[in-house]
Image: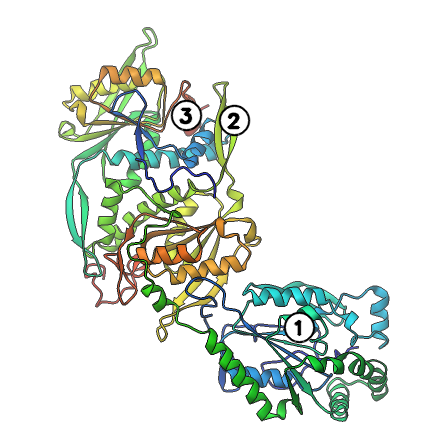
Amino acid sequence: MEPDLIQNSQPPAMSNGDGYGANVIRLRMTDQIKELQTVLRDKSTCRGDFIFFADRLIRLVVEEGLNELPYQKHVITTPTGCSYDGLRYIRGNCGVSIMRSGEAMEQGLRDCCRSIRIGKILIQSDEETHEAKVFYAKFPPDVHTRKVLLMYPIMSTGNTVIKAVEVLKQHGVVEENIIVLNLFCTPIAVRLVVKAYPSLKILTSEIHNLAPVHFGQKYFGTD
Amino acid sequence: MLNPPSSAMALSGGKRRARTTSSSGTAAEGPVVRYGSRTIYTAGRPPWYDSHGQLKEPFVIGLSGGSASGKTTVARRIIEALDVQWVSLLSLDSFYKVLSPEQHKAASNNEYNFDHPDAFDFDLVAETLQRLKEGKNVEVPIYNFSTHSREKLKKTIYGANVVIFEGILAFCNTEAREAMDMKVFVDTDSDIRLARRLRRDISDRGRDIDGVIKQYEKFVKPAYDHYIEPTMTFADIIVPRGGENNIGVNLIVNLVHQQLKKRGFKLRSKLKQAAHIGQPMPNTLHVLEPTQQIKGLHTFIRNRETNRDEFIFYSNRLMRLLIEFALSLMPHKSVSVNTPQGFCYEGKRLDTTRLCGVSILRAGECLEPALSEVCKHIRLGKILIQTNLDTGEPELHYLRLPKDIKENHIMLMDATVATGAAAMMAIRVLLDHDVPEENILLVSLLMAESGVHSVAYAFPKVRLVTTAVDPDVNDQFHILPGIGNFGNRYFGTESKHSYNPQSA
């Protein structure tokens, strides 16, 4: 048998991101997740493959992220007449994507939650000051009552996400209610975001010194 | 020529036709073969292995006798009287050697000896019989008597409950003889055989009398005296007068019935009874971690009130996670790639060209889209296994597998594994196609404990991948608490009286 990673010991699917605090969680590393990351990192990957593998990784991050949303006990009856102690998801969530690359993650969220509300924020760095500046923001009107899945695939400096959370907080969203869904981030970015917002949750697939910053260009084909 | 010394069986009955190719076969082509007014070999192959997944050896009958002695008739009578499913008929004619151009020329002048042991490829005969005995599928050559070569296409024959191997020199080779459980020699008087041969060749095949007699004197008779008649000493039973000998045929049939009875059993009921209670789960079992999401998805698909739209949506989500999980168990190789950022990244790649999916119809097909979504261009095989309502046993009805499947890692997919009977039959089929046991991953949304134990006990190297394991199986072989009949709920074919009132 191959030396496989999972066996029966069943370690948790997500592990704390090694010294970044309890609110930073990483997808459990398996060969297949490593493969997805390898293809996305590879310079020679064609755009079709890039999108295909990015969508797979996004889907896995989204499915994991949904675990952070609230639920309640729910007992149901199966077709064989037995009762089953299950769980029911609680409504009152929404997604917010940070334009442009965050939009790549919207479909992954839609594939799991068909009618979820999705807000958008456009943040760009100011040409003179190089500071992150908000150009556009549109959220569901009751966003302050909701849990927010904030989608942004690449965190290199962390500035964009810090700015986006600031905007959400201005709209009344509580810091604990925000979960950042991310594919790749750098240790610097994680530390910076955690320092700025200690109650925020960050879910990522990899923390690595160099982030694949070409993600948005390659995904949307604007190299 | 051509007058092959013994002629293959035309099960369709009626007149013997002049024939250009050899015709071994699993009784005949289609799944259902009617012979006269009765069905010899019905659709659906019952299990050919026991409740531990081990092979039941097929009963091999060797049938020899001189040319035109009535071997074919005896074989037909045996098959007819046996009345068992899955009889494979193998003819020695299929194993003629390919002729060189000179030999081919000699053959067209009636100068080539087709009745000599050297004319046959006995190595291949022995190998083929051995594989059939192991329950494996074999590729039997189709011999073309006009070109004296093998056709490109081969005939696939599966191991069966009974294998009949017939031919003039069937007992000539020691290895082939050792593979036979019973050896029958059809001893017909040489005058009668010559008379039959003359009639067959002259009136049925339009050949001239001088040629036929020349061939008989030069090859057929000496071959019988030198090679065929001496092998009579190996026979367990000698049947005088061939096919008309009812007592002889009945004796053979009774003996075979006794042997088959000894090897028979009930599979599924036995599987359910298997005492695995309290045993720890096998370490080949891999269960997706039960996060809240997984539990929530299960709640939707297990609920009998869930309508079909939601049932399909949530089961598809669960399947995607299951397939991604199963992929993580596949062998990956380490690679390093160059990144646009200018550094080298140490990663992993999966070789998807050596991966293929096989679904157990019908419910297993539901998992195909999930697999195709994550593995582009993946090849998919299908196996149809259905439960015989009379016996409660699984039966194999249909099989299409990708070529060179033995080189592959297989994701064998079924929606649920209850007793494990269908999964075991499917695994057995893959093993018969030379897929190594450790290359098989049985992937299922839901498994019952007893099924997990049965499959793991029978096939300790097959890995089982699922999203949950339930404790029980009821008398209808449904998992408890379970999800009901997955296929019916997914495809919307449940009856109105079923538990699901909303999915009309």
Q: Residue at x 55, y 89 (%)?
A: B250
**Circle 3: is it few (<14), some (14-19), or many (20+) Cα within 10 Å?**
many
Chain that bears disc 1:
B
Question: Would you name the residue on which mark 1 appears?
Answer: B177
Chain that bears disc 2:
B
Vertical relation: B374 (above or below) B71: above
Task: Identify which amino acid the numbered label 3 is placed on.
Answer: Phe
x, y (%) of residue B315?
30, 50
x, y (%) of residue B362?
38, 60
The answer to which of B382 and B49 lies nearer the viewer is: B49
Q: Residue at x 70, y 88 (%)?
A: B187
Chain that bears disc 3:
A
Task: Identify which amino acid the numbered label 1 is placed on.
Answer: Arg
Instruction: Mark 3 vs mark 2: tell me if same chain.
Output: no
Vertical relation: B8 (above or below) B195: above
- Element under label 1? helix
Which-is-in-front pick, marks 3 and 1?
A: 1
Question: Would you name the residue on which mark 2 appears?
Answer: B337
Vertical relation: A129 (above or below) B294: above
Evaluate if marks 3 and 2 touch, with contact meaning CB atoms under 8 Å apart. no
Left or right of B144 in this view: B248: left
Residue B41 bears which disc, if any? none
Task: Identify which amino acid the numbered label 2 is placed on.
Answer: Val
Vertical relation: A1 (above or below) A151: below
Which-is-in-front pick, marks 3 and 2?
A: 2
Q: CA distance from mark 3 to mark 1?
A: 68 Å
Can the viewer see residue A23? yes
- Element under label 2? strand
Residue A215 bears which disc, if any? 3
